[in-house]
Amino acid sequence: MYEPPHFRTDDAAAQAALIRACPLGLLVSAGAGGLMANPVPFLLDEGAGGERVLRAHLARANPHWRDLDGLPECLVVFQGPDRYVTPSWYATKRETGKVVPTWNYATVQARGRPRVIEDEAWLRRQIDDLTRMQESGRDAPWSVADAPPAFTAAQIRGIVGIEIPIARLTGKWKVSQNRTEADRAGVAAGLRRDAGGNDAMADLVDRLGVRA
């Protein structure tokens, strides 16, 4: 990934927060079956020693898991907020006219050696944890235990687990850090107007400050 210094984000907490806020990662690999990519929801485990592991599962019918087995590396891309930025929001447009459109975004890329897991207990923990992560904020959260045990067991037989110890994690927050303070203020205001108020990208533009 191309990472100019003013857009690169090495903050481990910020990277982890984006993964947890946007857990549907694009799993990419190049194996015997060629280049393959599948969107998959991931869980991120962080150990006391700083180790980080991604966990997910795929349908057994999906050939991607067979291609992962034995690969030295795969890539998972997590995409955070993104927005088109019109030159009309820049103060520089009124001053010189020397402006062009761009696209702001936040993204994290994780690389590591994948491990295929077919252990039933691991898979049950995986679906319990993933369900809990998504259901915990609901008024009446659904639990895997709510389904009949025989049905759940049959569903588990239809999936395969993937575990990826992260060897390298990179983050890129392209949120107008290379623009002047006046341009950045115009971008944040324009994004909020278009969104009718709250806008996640506008918050990032405001918060991260100028790095140029």
Image (cartoon, helix red, strand yellow):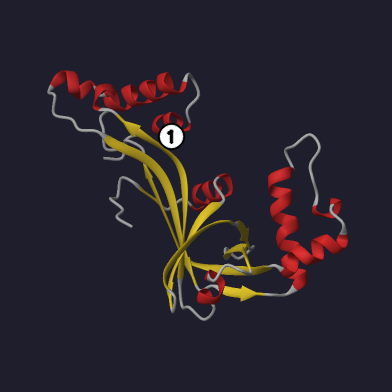
For the point 80% across and 61% down, which residue is it?
A: 152
Whether residue 195 sits left or right of residue 54 in the image: it is: left
| Relative vertical location of residue 114 with respect to residue 140 in this rendering, above or below | below
Can you name the residue that lies furthest to the bottom here?
70
Whether residue 60 sits left or right of residue 76 in the image: it is: right
| Kind of residue sitting beneath label 1 | Leu
Based on the displayed image, in which of its 4 quarters is residue 208 positioned? Answer: top left
In the image, residue 27 lies at what x, y percent?
A: 49, 61
Q: Residues within 10 Å of mark 1 (few under 14, many from 20)?
A: many
For the point 28% across and 22% down, which residue is it?
A: 89
Of the 4 image quadrants, the one containing the C terminus is: top left
Whether residue 184 sits left or right of residue 79 in the image: it is: left
Based on the displayed image, in which of its 4 quarters is residue 94 positioned? Answer: top left
Of the 4 image quadrants, the one containing the N terminus is: bottom left
Give the camera-side residue of 95 and 196.
196
| Relative vertical location of residue 105 with respect to residue 42 in this rendering, above or below | above
In the image, residue 29 lies at what x, y percent?
A: 44, 69
Give the camera-side residue of 37 and 76.
37
Location of mark 1 (residue): 204
For the point 45% across and 53% down, which residue is it?
A: 108
Whether residue 193 sits left or right of residue 91 in the image: it is: right
Based on the displayed image, in which of its 4 quarters is residue 2 positioned? Answer: bottom left
In the image, residue 44 lies at what x, y percent?
A: 60, 57
**Element assignment for label 1:** helix
